[in-house]
Image (cartoon, rainbow, N blue to C red):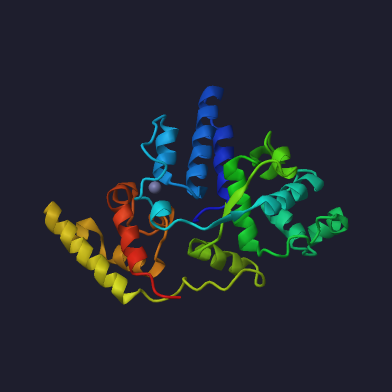
Amino acid sequence: MAYGLTDIVQQRRMIDESNGADAFKRVSIRKLDALVGLAETANCRRTRLLGYFGETPNSARCGNCDNCLSPPRVRDGKVIAQKLLSCAYRTGQRFGAMHLIDVLVGRMTDRVKQFGHDKLSVFGVGRELNETQWRAALRQLVAMGHLAPDSEAFGALKFTETSRGVLKGETEVMLREETAGSRVRASRTRSRRGDLAPRPTGAGQPADATLLASLRAWRSEVARQRGMPAYVVLHDTTIDGIATARPTTLSQLRDIPGIGDKKLEHYGEDLLKLVAAARPSG
Ligand SMILES: [Zn+2]
């Protein structure tokens, strides 16, 4: 995912601080929540989107979106969710993602020492996941509405009405397993903190020649069909960008320079299919 919890907090703050009427702000927050939910869902995105617009989809899966084409692996996230919620609770619901993760993985930061959080029972109980995985789990819990970042309290993660059910183990929580999609994020995290994040394998690699060829062939075909020059369909640098980044989701694709909303809408699914088809082994 090409965004983090801080982005959500910022967007919320911008809405809160805008001059709009309260009703408008509520609608904006709801839209933002829907967008985050769409980004984090492990289920069909199209049916989720239809549901948001009040339409009833014909089937549970469209068979065409990235989640349908390469379904993310999900696992039972009950214990992970309980650890996160318990950590947020025991630290007073006053801290953001970074500190909660520090406590869970048992990292002795100045802040941990300052607040005596190394004395808490949750200190170091989350060593089974690395930082990237914890961040992904947190984003999903927020997307599911089991935790809410408070933009007025600098993104402190607070309980919602559903938090207690999860904490007690009464609510099922399925979490996506972190896949290739987390690589960009992982490399960024690593540059900030030298130790914990996994070694990124996708970033920094040269463009995949097979993928480049298939992207170019696809572009010629589209250009022919639409009667427009190839560079209008997609620029060479954009084609190179796709072959290098190998995006697996629409939001990753959107991050590549030259891909705007229009191009994402027209070509997004096709491009993701091409990338998926040319996936290198291993
Ligand atoms: Zn779908």
- Residue 268 or residue 109, whichever sits in front: 268
Relative side of 4 to 109, left or right: left
- Residue 235 or residue 215, whichever sits in front: 215
- Horizontal and vertical percent position of residue 280: 39, 74
Location of residue 69 by image quarter: bottom left
Q: Is residue 56 above or below residue 127?
A: above
- Horizontal and vertical percent position of residue 267: 28, 53
Q: Is residue 190 above or below residue 112?
A: below
- Residue 27 or residue 181, whichever sits in front: 181
Q: Residue at image x 56%, y 59%?
A: 177
Q: Is residue 183 visible?
A: yes
Q: Is residue 19 visible?
A: no
Q: Residue at image x 52%, y 33%?
A: 30
Q: Residue at image x 45%, y 56%?
A: 71
Q: Residue at image x 71%, y 39%?
A: 165
Location of residue 186 by image quarter: bottom right
- Horizontal and vertical percent position of residue 218: 22, 63
